[in-house]
Amino acid sequence: MTDIAWLREDFPLLVNNPEIAYLDNAATTQKPREVMDAVRDYYELENANPLRGLYDLSVRATEAYEFARQAVRDFIGAASEREIIFTRNASESLNLVAFCLSEAFLKEGDEILITVMEHHSDLLPWQQAARRHGAVLRFIECDSHGLITEENFRSCLTDRTRIVAMTHISNVLGVKNDIRTFAALAHSRGAVFVADGAQSVPHIPVNVQDLGVDFLAFSGHKMLAPMGIGVLYGREAVLEKLPPFLYGGEMIEYVTRESATYAELPHRFEAGTVNVGGAVGLAAAIRYYGKIGFHFIEEREKALSEYAMERLCQVPHLRLLGAEKAEDHHGIFTFTIDGVHPHDIAAILDEEGVDIRAGHHCAQPLMQFLGTPSTVRASLAFYNTEAEIDRLAEALMTVRRRMGYDD
Amino acid sequence: MMIKSFYNQILTDHNLRPGNKHDLPEANYVLRGVNPSCGDDITLRLKVEDGVIEDGAYTGDGCAVSQASADIMLDLIIGRPVEEAEALSGLFLKMVRDKVTGEELERLEEAAALQDISHMPARVKCAVLGWHTLDNILADLKALDK
């Protein structure tokens, strides 16, 4: 076991709630003190409306905001900060790209290809886009372990495929899709490739140029940053062809009574006063990632995943969904216990101070495919401990007896 | 190991061995109740004659709280006049949302086992699903009378 007490000290919520085993990190992570300090410092020292004020304070707020954009560009390996659009969260990023891509490129009879394992936020915007433009929404199926093969992917691409959207890591099964291969195949057929990085960017190094994606969406709050800040990466050559998403202040160049011309990238896609505090917090989170290092994070989460898998498999009547190898779960463990409803499992774990998620995880088509309407999900972060996984496993061992079963 | 848990024996017994979870072909009032957010789903069937709930049953899926609560409710209301069932439902809702007196708690019989749900806001909707469905049937009944 690794002693990571030093690291947990960085997270005030963990320190303030020693009775809680927080295992719902795929929903949102806790925040290090440095992130909260950065947000407070921004509001105490530099706050003004950015991008338009002519006085020094506004210039400093603008600099803080644009500095955060550079930090994001470096973090995901984008070619230019013109390709980094700040949003509220991954859902808004996906709504933006689905709306604008479909307005620009989608014609009647065209196809949008997504997978059965998408989060609702990477499904509903495409459903609507298809409906608006008379396009067809097609689904790639996975196997019971969540695997999508290259062969399967190829067989779903057609001459009418204009857009492919796919999660990088599934929020239910933890399985990682081979985005690099799929993006290259999509491009070979002339389709645009959109990746949902909400569960990957916080846990593995993600480089947009290496993956070859045209768009990547992710949320700040799942990667140590405050809620209310998210990112849409868009490849400049594609982004340039898209119409605006929201209209209003800051996104214009020149406006008359009847018409307007729009600002340069990325401001064209950031209407209204932006969330500088959130962006500053995200930049601080990225600095924290840099300090801890993905090498450490990946090793740590892999070790925790192996331990969690071992402990969960010892729980009688527990059925784990997804891959057989611990490392293929990327810290996400979704399961059921025979005869006990997931909401009752969650309530019993809550009585023991173990915080997990129960329900359909905003991925109902996948739950239907897996044949279970509701499941329990424990999801890990690098700051979790083996002791917390022990508490999860021990509480799970008591669930059936507490629900009146003899074993 | 003794564990103090919200899931007391009355609740778990009604969940695992429900007495009223079955079809009721002679029912003259049937209504489905659903919690879309968590998937609790019950269908309540009542046989009402001359203002008295002569028989009742339910079928469905969901968490122990939603299923046991419906089973306990039926034990309580079968054989009672509609007005009494309505009053008991009102008391149950009061218990899970706020507080009831000791005397009121006694009138709720085994349904009192769900008292602690008032401390679990996320689960109140599970506990009241059967009772809301009952209220909806009783409201329809009254509308028909007028």
Image (spheres, coloured by chain):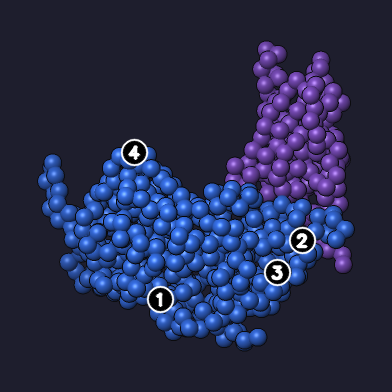
Chain colours: A blue, B purple
The answer to the question of whether label 3 and label 2 lie on touching residues, with beta carbons closer than 8 A, is no
Residue A166 placement, left or right of A105: right
Residue with the mark numbered 1 = A286
Which callout, 1 or 4, points to the residue nearer the camera? 4
Q: How many residues crowd around disc 4 within 10 Å: few (fewer than 14), some, or many (20 or more)?
A: some
Q: Nearer the viewer, residue A240 or B49?
A: A240
Dot 3 or dot 1, earlier in sequence: 1
Q: Which residue is mark 4?
A: A134
| Secondary structure of the residue carrying numbered label 3 | helix
Q: Position of residue B72 (x, y in %)?
A: 82, 39
> Which subunit holds the residue at mark 4?
A
Q: Quadrant of the rendered structure where residue A315 is? A: bottom right
Residue labelled with disc 3: A312
Q: Position of residue A316 (x, y in %)?
A: 78, 64
Give the CA distance from mark 3 to mark 2: 10 Å
- Image point (83%, 59%), residue name: A401
